[in-house]
Amino acid sequence: YDTILDPVRRRSYNLSTFPETDEEEAPRPSRLPVSQEQLMLQAELSREVHAETEFTGELLRKVRESQGVGLEEIASRTKITIGHLSALEEERYDELPAHVYVRGFVQQLARHLKLDSSQVAKTYLRRMRETLAARGQR
C-alpha cells in the first residue's frame, strides 16, 4: 500500500509493471494549429451562437473546426463513431440510430465543444424531427 501512496516508488513500480505505458509517452490530444481561417470562424461564431441559436449540423461542424478539433479526437474521447459524428454534422438523419441515442450523441458532442448541451440537443432534435416528418420518416 505504501508503494501506491509514495509517488517515487509508485512511478518505479508502474514502469516495472507496465513499461510501455510511461506517462510521459502518452499521446497528447491532437489539436490542429490555429490558422487564419479558424480565427475568422471564431469571430463569426461569436456573433452566431447565443441563447436562442438553432444548432444545425453545419453550425456544429463550424464550432468544431474553429476549435481545431478533429472528428478522430471527438470519437476517441466520446466513443461515438466517426460515421455517426459525420452523419450528425451532415444531417444524414437516415444513417443515425434511434432518437434517444442521437440525443446522447448530440449532448456529448456539445459538452466536448463547450456548448450548452440541453440547448444544442433541443434545437438539433427539433430540426431532425421536422425534417423526418416532412419526408414521412420515423
Image (cartoon, rainbow, N blue to C red):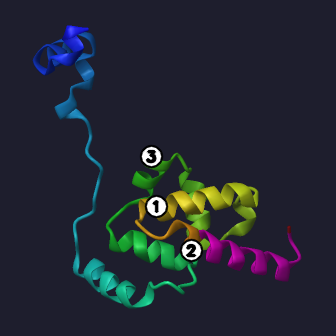
Identify the mark nearer the N-term, 2 or 3.
3
Q: CA distance from mark 2 to mark 3?
A: 24 Å
Q: Which residue is mark 2?
A: 119
- Amino acid tagged 2: Gln
- Is 34 displayed left or right of 75 in the figure? left
Rendering coords of residue 133 (x, y %): 84, 78
Q: Which residue is mark 3?
A: 76
Rendering coords of residue 101 (x, y %): 68, 54
**Image height of 24 relative to 50, above or below:** above
- Residue 33 found in image quarter: bottom left
Magenta region includes residue 129: yes
Residue at x 29% of width, y 77% of height: 38
Residue at x 43% of width, y 59% of height: 112
Rendering coords of residue 104 (x, y %): 62, 56
Q: Which residue is mark 1?
A: 111
Magenta region includes residue 39: no
Q: Nearer the viewer, mark 1 or mark 3?
A: 1
Identify the mark nearer the N-term, 1 or 2.
1
Q: CA distance from mark 1 to mark 3?
A: 14 Å
